[in-house]
Image (spheres, rainbow, N blue to C red):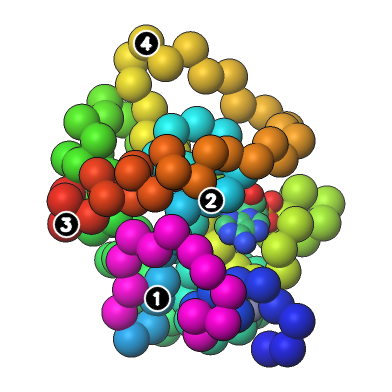
Amino acid sequence: MEDCIFCKIAAQQLPSAKVYEDEQFSVFMDINPVGKGHCLLIPKTHHEDVFTIPEDLLRDLIVVAKRLAKAIKTGMNADGMYIWQANGRAAGQLIPHYHMHFLPRWEDDKLTIGSWEPVAGNMDEIQAVAEEIKKGF
Ligand code: AMP
Ligand code: ZN
């Protein structure tokens, strides 16, 4: 879809710190990470949210989600994994292209997560984390 940032990332028309891709999905680091390792899983095709994404695609996506969660956990030696997904402005969805957030958690990370304002991360650090996650696949 024209003017969709995530469609452009999927089509490699915009840069991203890519972690994984296959025919249907792409995974890249969030540029405003809530914590270390924050990344996003998207379908390459444009669907706005859980209300419109086809069920078949969602079935395939959840399998990739599981593999990704394990890869992040292994690659970053995480203790746990926070996974979330916003649908619609009312739920805080900023980018209207379906995406699932992944955030590795450690017992002592002291993160508190509620609503948050985007804060740009350091791209060198983000790229280094992408490499750590790739090793987990
Ligand atoms: P949501 O509120 O679920 O729509 O979250 C959208 C997420 O996309 C936010 O965490 C943003 O930091 C992230 N984001 C926005 N633009 C980009 C981009 N160009 N590359 C990576 N992540 C992005
Ligand atoms: Zn899109």
Quadrant housing residue 2: bottom right
- Residue with the mark numbered 3: 137
Determine crowd level at label 4: few under 14, some 14-19, many 20+ residues with C-alpha closer than 10 A. Answer: few
- Residue with the mark numbered 2: 30
Whether label 2 lies within 8 Å of ligand 1 gets the answer: yes
Q: Residue 24, position in %: x, y?
A: 38, 83
Find numbered disc 2 in the image and state the secondary structure of the residue it sits on: loop
Sequence order check, earlier mark of 4 and 1? 1
Q: Residue 23, position in %: x, y?
A: 33, 86
Q: Estimate the spatial distance between the alpha carbons at disc 4 and disc 1, rounded to whole Å.
A: 32 Å
Residue at image location 42% in from the left, 38% down from the top: 125
The residue stretch that appears in magenta: 11-22
Horizontal side of residue 17 vs 5, given as left or right: left
Residue at image location 73% in from the left, 55% down from the top: 93
Determine crowd level at label 1: few under 14, some 14-19, many 20+ residues with C-alpha closer than 10 A. Answer: some
Horizontal side of residue 53 vs 59, given as left or right: right
Q: Estimate the spatial distance between the alpha carbons at disc 3 and disc 1, rounded to whole Å.
A: 15 Å
User: Is residue 132 shown to the viewer in this render?
Assistant: yes
Instruction: Tell me if residue 21 is in the magenta stretch.
Output: yes
Residue placed farthest to the front in the image?
Answer: 124
Q: Nearer the viewer, mark 4 or mark 2?
A: 2
Mark 2 and 1 residues: CB-CB less than 8 Å, in contact?
no
Q: Estimate the spatial distance between the alpha carbons at disc 2 and disc 3, rounded to whole Å.
A: 19 Å
- Residue with the mark numbered 4: 108
- Residue with the mark numbered 1: 25
